Amino acid sequence: MQQRRFHQVDVFSAIPYMGNPVAVVLDAQGLDDSQMQGFARWTHLSETTFVLPPTDAQADYRLRIFTPAGELQFAGHPTLGSCHAWLVAGGAPKSAEFVLQQCGAGLVRVRRDAQRLAFGAPPMQRSVPDRTLLAELSTALGLPTEQVRSAQWLDNGTRWLCLLLNTAQSVLRLNPDFSALKALGHKVGVAGLQPAAVGSDAPALAVRAFAPHMGIDEDPVTGSLNASLAQWLIADGVMPAHYLAAQGERLQRAGRVFVERDTAGQVWVGGDTVSCITGSVCI
């Protein structure tokens, strides 16, 4: 065991403790899979990351991402939080334009501007869910079927079963049966529209994320889900090319996710990041 630099970063909030925390272990060389998984289980955060030297010469660092139950190929808030920690710890990117992260899903660009970080959403695959599964999901969510506008499987390195509801209020009123959701065994994302907010500074989309089969009943703010939702909803003309999403209200959080699709068609998902704990851990 040895001392390793450590940050706990709140993501998608400029106010500490109002976003989604990620534990970031810097200098993670020498740790094996079981040690990483054991530490992630101990932190019991939705994700814990480990920063390693890249194996791709283009990348600035390599990132491994663990939930309490297993490893993810990609996740959004750990990407932003880990990049924040790496930069604060003195990381020097090869490019003046962006930081390049290597992870299980490939190379992910993280853009820096004067206010916040934003990651380029990885390519996404989508398909229509089975009707029987949707009926089971609606029952587990306590959701009348008439409130569902559309449903998709979305996968950008993390696979989500997603529902678009008629209103943001429908999303916030959900009281899921977490045992039933756990039995389904899927990560579930639910989003609802706030049309009056489009074009204003207010959130135009309300989002919630559930993954009880992974030990996370509800995730406070979820980058990979918001990225997939943006790729889906902008492409289908449901949302504009720029909008603000809100997540975490039912958990007394105030997550804000800044979404943009640029002229080349790349979706960027951004948020504020702030270090809440800085020090070292013995692993």
Image (cartoon, grey):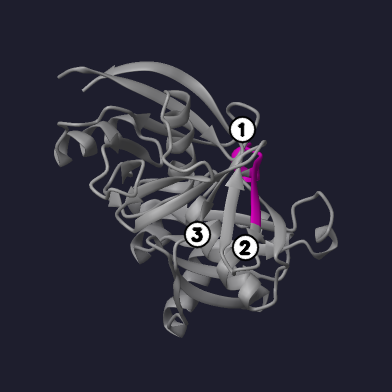
Residue 265, image x and y in percent? 59, 69
Q: Which residue is mark 3?
A: 121
Q: Residue at x 41, y 40 (%)?
A: 94
In the image, is residue 250 part of the stretch drawn in magenta?
Answer: yes
Up-down: is 167 above or below 2?
Answer: below
Q: Residue at x 43, y 37 (%)?
A: 93
Q: Which residue is mark 2?
A: 191
Q: Residue at x 54, y 45 (%)?
A: 97
- The residues bearing labels 1 and 2 have C-alpha atoms spaced at a distance of 20 Å
Residue 35 is left or right of residue 180, and the answer is left
Residue 168 is left or right of residue 59, and the answer is right
SS at badge 3: loop
| Residue 144 seen in render | no
Q: Which segment did they paint magenta? A: 249-259
Q: Quadrant of the N terminus?
A: top left
Q: Amino acid at mark 1?
A: Met
Q: Which quadrant would residue 198 be assigned to in this image?
A: bottom right
Specify which label sits upstream in the sequence, 3 or 1.
Answer: 1
Q: Amino acid at mark 3?
A: Ala
- The residues bearing labels 3 and 1 have C-alpha atoms spaced at a distance of 23 Å
In the image, is residue 157 part of the stretch drawn in magenta?
Answer: no
SS at badge 1: loop
The residue carrying pointer 3 sits among few (fewer than 14), some (14 to 19) or many (20 or more) residues within 10 Å by Cα, namely: many
SS at badge 2: strand
Q: Quadrant of the C terminus?
A: top left
Relative depth, front residue between 29 and 98: 98
The residue carrying pointer 1 sits among few (fewer than 14), some (14 to 19) or many (20 or more) residues within 10 Å by Cα, namely: many
Q: Tell me the tag on residue 18.
A: 1
Q: Amino acid at mark 2?
A: Ala
Relative depth, front residue between 71 and 210: 71
Residue 103, image x and y in percent? 32, 50
Residue 234, image x and y in percent? 65, 71
